[in-house]
Image (cartoon, rainbow, N blue to C red):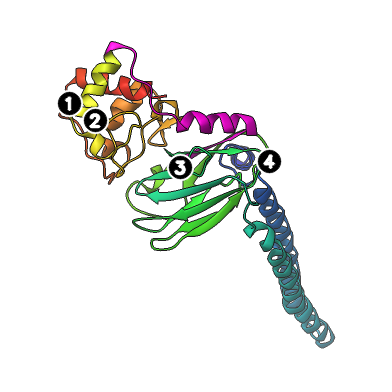
């Protein structure tokens, strides 16, 4: 039994040190600095614990008067001087890191406006082609410091990509900032770290770190209007999209759909996930459109259970073709 417990604990700690959402596997300059600070704080905590416990053990076992006098000195050193000195060093060390962690990107560096909305992320890139809007997927160039401008139109959320940087709250009526500088390529998971409602746990997003030339090509592709559907079922889906008023909430550039309430769907078929959490395929689109609240509780998008199976399938094919 003891062996199983030990193996279980070892497996838990080992698996928590890696993965696309692990703060212990830093892939960004800021995340690496935070990991270093964590190591120093853990070491300082261990030092304080050893000092305090040593003083307590010595004091409880001291019996003679002379030993009690020594114990008092031990308590002062291990219970007061050591913790105060260690915490002071850690405080100075942590504060010295803040200027670098708060530094924005240089002039000309990528900039993205992030709006945290229940329960998805609106991302607007400042590009040479003009503003380019996507949802639930942030793309960053490796080795470049990108500045994020964070806002929220509804409640307090918190933007956090543990593998890349620290977390910052998005506060209604205010603009906060966070800079991210990835140091290696890969796909990472971001999340909302502040309880915001029923779908808080499903308010996830993907971060893709690319080579600078790949990122520039992706931005250029995102700036283009949507291509007209090429297959019959997708063309039928475009008709369903228009006839059921989807364009009142969503934009598909190159069509008459120009709504701004919901995510921009111009290139939604090329994203990694539907609504940030479902597989990006026909089944994923159909599942979310039919009943969004089953996927994200309290989602503000209404369900479209009124659609026939044929209409729903056609609409899902249309969305999947918007790459």
Which residue is more in the foreground, 207 or 59? 207
Is disc 1 placed on a helix, strand or loop? loop
Please indicate, yes or no, whether residue 60 appears anywhere in the rendered image.
no
Q: Residues within 10 Å of mark 2 (few under 14, many from 20)?
A: some
Q: Which residue is mark 2?
A: 290
Which residue is more in the foreground, 311 or 242? 242
Whether tag 2 and tag 4 are in contact, CB under 8 A, the answer is no
Q: Is residue 118 left or right of residue 247?
A: right
Query: Does residue 112 lie above or below 208 as drawn?
Result: below
Say the numbered circle drawn on residue 307: 1
Span shown in magenta:
205-232
CA separation in Å, label 4 and label 1: 47 Å
Whether tag 3 and tag 4 are in contact, CB under 8 A, the answer is no
Q: Which residue is mark 4?
A: 143
User: Residue 17: x percent and y percent?
Assistant: 64, 42
Query: Residue shown at 69%/67% (left/top)?
Result: 95
Q: Which residue is mark 3?
A: 131
Q: Nearer the viewer, mark 3 or mark 4?
A: 3
């Amino acid at each position: 039994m003891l062996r199983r417990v030990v193996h279980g604990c070892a497996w838990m700690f080992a698996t928590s040190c890696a993965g696309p959402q692990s703060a212990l596997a830093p892939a960004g300059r800021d995340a690496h600095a935070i990991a270093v600070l964590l190591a120093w704080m853990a070491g300082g905590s261990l030092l304080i614990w050893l000092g305090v416990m040593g003083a307590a053990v010595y004091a409880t076992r001291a019996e003679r008067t002379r030993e009690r006098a020594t114990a008092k000195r031990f308590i002062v050193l291990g219970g007061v001087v050591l913790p105060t000195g260690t915490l002071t060093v850690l405080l100075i060390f942590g504060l010295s890191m803040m200027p670098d962690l708060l530094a924005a990107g240089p002039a000309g560096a990528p900039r993205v406006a992030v709006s945290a909305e229940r329960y998805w992320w609106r991302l607007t890139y400042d590009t040479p082609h003009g503003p380019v809007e996507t949802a639930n997927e942030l793309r960053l160039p490796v080795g470049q410091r990108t500045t994020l401008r964070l806002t929220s139109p509804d409640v307090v959320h918190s933007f956090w990509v543990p593998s890349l940087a620290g977390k910052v709250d998005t506060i209604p009526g205010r603009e906060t900032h966070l800079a991210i500088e990835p140091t290696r390529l890969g796909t990472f998971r971001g999340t909302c770290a502040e309880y915001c409602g029923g779908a808080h746990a499903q308010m996830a997003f993907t971060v893709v770190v690319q080579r600078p030339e790949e990122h520039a090509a992706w931005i250029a592709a995102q700036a283009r209007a949507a291509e007209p559907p090429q297959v019959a079922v997708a063309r039928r889906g475009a008709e369903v999209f228009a006839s059921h008023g989807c364009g009142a909430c969503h934009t598909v550039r190159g069509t008459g759909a120009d709504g701004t309430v919901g995510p921009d769907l111009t290139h939604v078929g090329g994203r990694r996930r539907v609504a940030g959490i479902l597989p990006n395929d026909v089944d994923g689109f159909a599942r979310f459109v039919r009943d969004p609240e089953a996927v994200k509780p309290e989602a503000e998008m209404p369900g479209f259970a009124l659609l026939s199976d044929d209409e729903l399938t056609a609409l899902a094919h249309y969305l999947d073709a918007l790459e």
